[in-house]
Image (cartoon, helix red, strand yellow):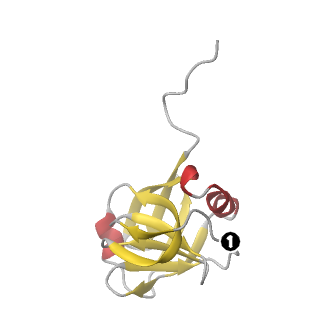
Amino acid sequence: MDKIQTAGSVSRIPMIIQIVDKGIAPCELIRHLSPLCVRTILNYLPLQDRIHKFSESIIYIETRLAIGAEKQKTQFKRGDIAYMTSNSSICIFTKDSVMTPMNPIGIVKSNLEIIESTQSGDIMILKKM
């Protein structure tokens, strides 16, 4: 008889968002939200770039990955992580927002205030825990 997996999950991958010289925010990528997108991102970790801000609701880094649309949605909550296909960016929402369609890929688990306090030009690194 097979054992049921209770600790951890293959669907939720523990990650860290590091803002250089500011701190870290634990997060997780969630496979079932956009399986192909999440797999591609995992294959290219760690991802690092300078932070850009879009309005008061999103910070993002460009990845230069070519990933297509997958299970896209337009409504996001504070702490959601999504992939924007139009500019190959990983976006983190700092406010509940309605946006252009994006691939949902995960959530920030804690320390979102570190991400909210970033400035354009700060360096963000997404890596496995």
- Measured as percent of width and height from the top left, residue 82 is found at 50, 68
- Quarter of the image for residue 58 reads bottom left
- Quarter of the image for residue 56 reads bottom left
The structure residue drawn at horizontal position 38% and vertical position 72%, both measured from the top left corner, is: 93
Seen in the picture, residue 57 relative to 8 is either above or below; the reply is below
- Indicate left or right for 114 with 102 as reference: left
Seen in the picture, residue 72 relative to 53 is either above or below; the reply is above
Seen in the picture, residue 15 relative to 45 is either above or below; the reply is above
- Measured as percent of width and height from the top left, residue 32 is found at 57, 50
- Indicate left or right for 82 with 45 as reference: left
- Indicate left or right for 75 with 90 as reference: left
Q: Residue furthest top?
A: 1
- Measured as percent of width and height from the top left, residue 128 is found at 56, 55
The structure residue drawn at horizontal position 69% and vertical position 62%, both measured from the top left corner, is: 40
Seen in the picture, residue 20 relative to 53 is either above or below; the reply is above
Q: How many marks?
A: 1
- Measured as percent of width and height from the top left, residue 96 is found at 31, 71
Nearest the camera: 6 or 121? Answer: 6
The structure residue drawn at horizontal position 59% and vertical position 58%, both measured from the top left corner, is: 34
- Mark 1: which secondary structure? loop
Disc 1: CA contacts within 10 A as few (<14), some (14-19) or many (>=20): some
The image quadrant where one finds the N terminus is: top right
Nearest the camera: 23 or 54? Answer: 54
Residue topped by disc 1: 67
The amino acid sitting under disc 1 is Ile
